[in-house]
Image (cartoon, grey):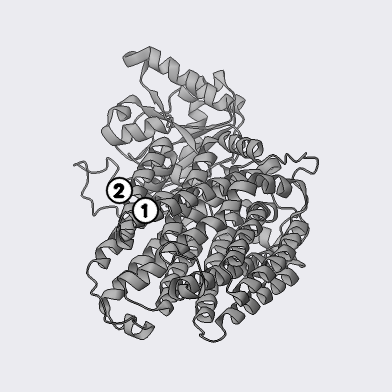
Amino acid sequence: MSDRPLPAARRAADADGAHESQFRLLRERRFAPFFWTQFLGAMNDNVFKIGFTSLVTYQAARFSGVNADTAAFLISAIFILPFVLFSATSGQIADKYDKAMLTRFVKTFEIVVMLVGGAGFWLHSAPLLYLCTFMMGVHSTLFGPVKYAYLPQHLEKRELVGGNGLVEMGTFVAILLGTIVGGAAAGVAAHGEAILAGGCIAIAVIGRVVSGFVPASRPAQAGLRINWNPVSETWRNLKLAREDRVVFLSLLGISWLWFVGATFLSSFFRFAKEVLSANPDVVTVLLATFSLGIGIGSLMCERLSKRRIEIGLVPLGSIGMSVFAIDLFLASHTLKGAPHLLSVAEFLAMPAHWRVLADLFLLAMFGGFYSVPLYALIQARSQPSHRARIIAANNILNSLFMIVSALMAVALTSAGVGIPGLFLVTALLNVVVAIYIYSLVPEFLLRFIAWLLVHTFYRIRLLHAERIPERGAAVLVCNHVSYVDAIVIMAESPRPIRFVMDREIFSMPLVGWLFRDAKAIPIAPAREDAALLEHAYDTCAQALADGELVCIFPEGKLTRTGELNPFRHGVTEILRRAPAPVVPMALCGLWGSVFSRAGAHWPRPLHKGVMSRLTLAVGEPLDPAQVSPEGLQQIVTDLRGAVK
């Protein structure tokens, strides 16, 4: 995946299971110049936008023809309009040319843009500032596909979550600094506009200098012929994205996050002024809290996911976002108006305001849990030859969702809905969208259940998990100790698995629906339903022919003693139809837990087995021609060892 091999020391560390912190990337040329280039670009975006928004919200009289109530939403809509118009073209350009060269071109363009913006601030010209807003949108449109296609080209797959976490953290720290600088400059009565103009130009120049150190990145498809028709190319990019259903729905999930984020961020100035009765400096506190939440949540993803692309964090993120957005609405109704606009010190002195800050921080933190795995999933599962165009499709969808967000905010505001009401509507819509997406792709929800289970009930040690293939067909074979064996294996697998399961599971109300939609394969003994058994074997063979992982528990039933039951001939029947490598596995430590059949009574009390230690040991892949039920049982027994 990377353009160059890993250093020997790092390869050795990974082999031992140890790894350095994700922050080491900030010391490496393949990442650091790119990181600081995008950091400065995001910071400059926000110095300009926050300065402009603050001026037209609190000093609207100095800008003729500006409506202070809708200006923030209009600025947001103008900024993202270029994403709709030019994302398709920028995706092609990013796939065709060296990304380092494109980065330097974009940063040179940023200097020109900020000269226009500086003139707008100096002359108090709203048209020039709106033009600069549009041009900054063009700048970000060009850089977006380069930014996210660069990472998988220079980082190993196991570094993607950490790298994306750093980029997300850096972006929102840049937003925080840009917010502070932009808000503080706009608040300087005499020379605020001049400070904003000079600051934006200076940051653009520094960004251009840093971009000169970004290493060369070979074009993904140098022979690509660019289609300059944005309409037809936009449609073609969306069709490319739809080729992988999970990738496309992940794009929609990210776009929905931008809908939610745009709604909140664009509302902060009016929220501070009308609901909190606070001055512009308090807006900086709100944005800082939100940015820190996103940054910390993004950085936590690597630890929570064990350096894997853990999409189980996505439902966790969406649940947290809705819970704390609803609580923010409730907290807003406990606030009492003030006779004057509160300063930061006065705002922080009131206990009720700390609940508001806590809601904003936690909402944003769960947003980090939501976004980082989705970005990493898209980068990992997209074909390298058109990865930048997939990112361009993402930017198109993001911009459409953000425009709808701005239109919804303007419509609800015009209808008399206050900012807290806007937050509540967004939170409830988030619940509806989450339910819809997870019903379409149960893999997200199943991974969430698996992640929650293994982080609540068990502490898992993995032995040779790298033997589970990341690509290609294989049959996974494991002992059957508990009712959650499949979920534990799913939680530790780098990719989806088709589990062969007793048909009775499919009649269970919730679990059955989840596993049916996850394309598990029902099976029954020949004496009960010979036709279903034959159909299961054929389905397994087709899944293997399609390059999927199939997992079977050859015992056919849960152990009642902790010892392995005799292995049946199901594995050999599957391999007779579709030969594929066989990966033996053993679960150790589940016997005696709450989900096993240990003890005289079942189910066991919930307090038994909580936070149990267990091991998933993975054996060497076997040639299908050498596989027999007896031989597999011996290998799995040896892998399990003495611990049941």
Relative image position of residue 151 (x, y in whole percent): 65, 55
Can residue 238 be seen from the camera position used here? yes
Q: Nearer the viewer, residue 606 or 283?
A: 283
Image coordinates of residue 22 in percent, x first then y, are 58, 65
Tag 1: amino acid: Tyr
For image coordinates 34% across by 14% down, the residue present is: 529
From the viewer's side, name the closer residue of 144 and 451.
144
Residue at screen point 56% across, 60% down: 162
Residue 593, which numbered label?
Answer: 2
Q: In percent of the image, x 80 and y 44: which residue is there?
A: 222
Pointer 2 and pointer 1: residues touching (CB < 8 Å)? yes
In the rendered view, tell whether residue 283 sits above or below residue 330: below
Q: Amino acid at mark 2?
A: Ser
- Residue 568: mark in rendering: none
Res. 517 image quadrant: top left
Residue at the disc numbered 1: 458
Helix, strand, or loop for circle 1? Answer: strand
Quick one: which residue is furthest to the right in this view?
223
**What is the crowding at mark 2: few (fewer than 14 residues within 10 Å), some, or many (at least 20)?**
many
Above or below: residue 535 compared with residue 198: above
